[in-house]
Image (tube, rainbow, N blue to C red):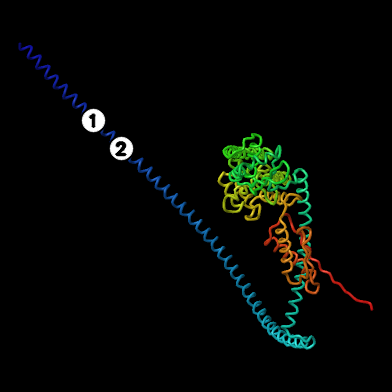
Amino acid sequence: MSLVIAVLVTAIVVAAITWVISGEVRKRRYEAKIGSADERSREIIDEALKVAETKKREALLEAKEESLKTKNELEKETRERRAELQRYERRVLSKEENLDKRAETLEKREAGMSAREEAIKKRAADVETLYGKQQAELERISGLTTDEAKAYLLKQVEDDVKHDQARMIREMEEQAKEEADKKARDYVVTAIQRCAADNVAEATVSVVQLPNDEMKGRIIGREGRNIRTLETLTGVELIIDDTPEAVVLSSFDPVRREVARIALEKLIVDGRIHPARIEETVEKARKEVENKMVEDGEAAMLEVGVHGIHPELVRLLGKMKYRTSYGQNALMHSIEVAQIAGLLASEVGVDVRMAKRAGLLHDIGKAVDHEQEGTHVELGAALCRKYKEPAVVINSVESHHGDVEPTSLISCLVQAADTISAARPGARRETVETYTTRLKKLEDIANSYKGVDKSFAIQAGREIRVMVVPEQVSDDDMVLLAREISKKIQDELQYPGQIKVNVIRESRVTEYAK
């Protein structure tokens, strides 16, 4: 037991001694490490101080070099600016010297100008004095005052200008007329040659052939009831006279006359003539004429080669077959105008179909002008607008008699074609009253001008010859007079074709031998 305790005590003592020794050893080791760390830190600090010193020296050197470089640049820039300022100073001095020289020159010129002005004023005064003396001398020699001489010179200049104006007008008119006549003649001749037209004058009566004279009594009926019924229903006058086997239907309305003719022919063929049958036959004849109008309108379109016209306009075209103007059938005239307009359009290079369409519809207003108020131009334009015709066609309708200015070449061609169709020989006829009135107006217009001695309308009113007094109208005045007369005729008269105005001036000397 005691041995164990002793061992334990010994072990404890040994452990304590060992722990003390090991602690001492560790302490020494720590002290040695601390000493070496202090020495190392001192070395690092010394090195850092040396590096800092070196960096400081380098920074100072760089700063000195940069300062030196900046100083050199500033000195260089200063030298350059100083040199530039010196150049500017030299240029300013040079300009000042030039300005001084110019000022001296201008002063010398002003002095010279003043002297010249004085000399000019003196010479102007001398010239004015001399001019006054010359003017007085001229007035004394010529016997005219200044105003009278001025008026004489103005009159001379006016006469010269008038002469030159008339000569230029004559030359330009002749040249333009030659060129225009040549081209127009070629176009019109070509169009007319290619367009065949009949010379037919419409009448206001129709003749119905009878199988025998006994039929006249049946047409008249008991106490004239049949003929009265027929005349009342158709609005046509039946003329039954001594003409063998014929009855004459008279009416200014071609549609009514055609209805009466068809109805009478049907009654003659049927043989049953009494008021009820007459009324039935007249109604059938009216329907037949209406259908015939549509057929005639379609035939006209087919003949001209125009399509797409509104059915109502087609019917009105057919109705124009029963309408005349100065004896010329309106539908035949429209077809002829359409063909001529198409031929002219092909010559000048515009739309042929549109020209034909405009020519065919240009007088469409004549189909309704006896039923509605307004001219056929206004009514035709309204119809074309109503049924959506192109603007070119509407303008052609409005302008073919000059009521509206034409806006396209097609309108001008339709106007020309209308004139050609109306003016060709045999196309139209005039009443004696209209003819004589037109001739008298032509002569009255010519006689209304000063210097006109006599005037004569010749060639059925297509030419007027104006005789002037030679002492009152000069050769130059003749040109202006002819233009004024032709312009007044255009403004005041309506006529087919054109009227030639001839102004004649001649001097005659008569002497008698005794």
Residue placed under numbered mark 2 in the picture: 41
Q: Mark 1 packing: few (<14 Cα in 10 Å), some, or many (20+)?
A: few
Rounded to the nearest angstrom, the CA distance separating label 2 from label 1 is: 16 Å
- Taking depth in this image into account, of 463 and 291 the one nearest to the observer is 291
> Is residue 338 visible in this depiction of the protein?
no
Amino acid on which the number 2 mark rests in the picture: Ser
**Residue farthest to the left?**
1
In the rendered image, residue 170, in percent from the top left (x then y), is placed at 78, 63
**Residue farthest to the front?**
223
Vertical placement of residue 450 versus 21, above or below: below
Residue placed under numbered mark 1 in the picture: 30
Classify mark 1: helix, strand or loop.
Answer: helix
Which residue is at a point 49% across and 53% down the rendered structure image? 69
Classify mark 2: helix, strand or loop.
Answer: helix
**Quadrant of the rendering where the C terminus is positioned:** bottom right
In the rendered image, residue 494, in percent from the top left (x then y), is placed at 68, 58
Quarter assignment of residue 245? top right
Q: Mark 2 packing: few (<14 Cα in 10 Å), some, or many (20+)?
A: few
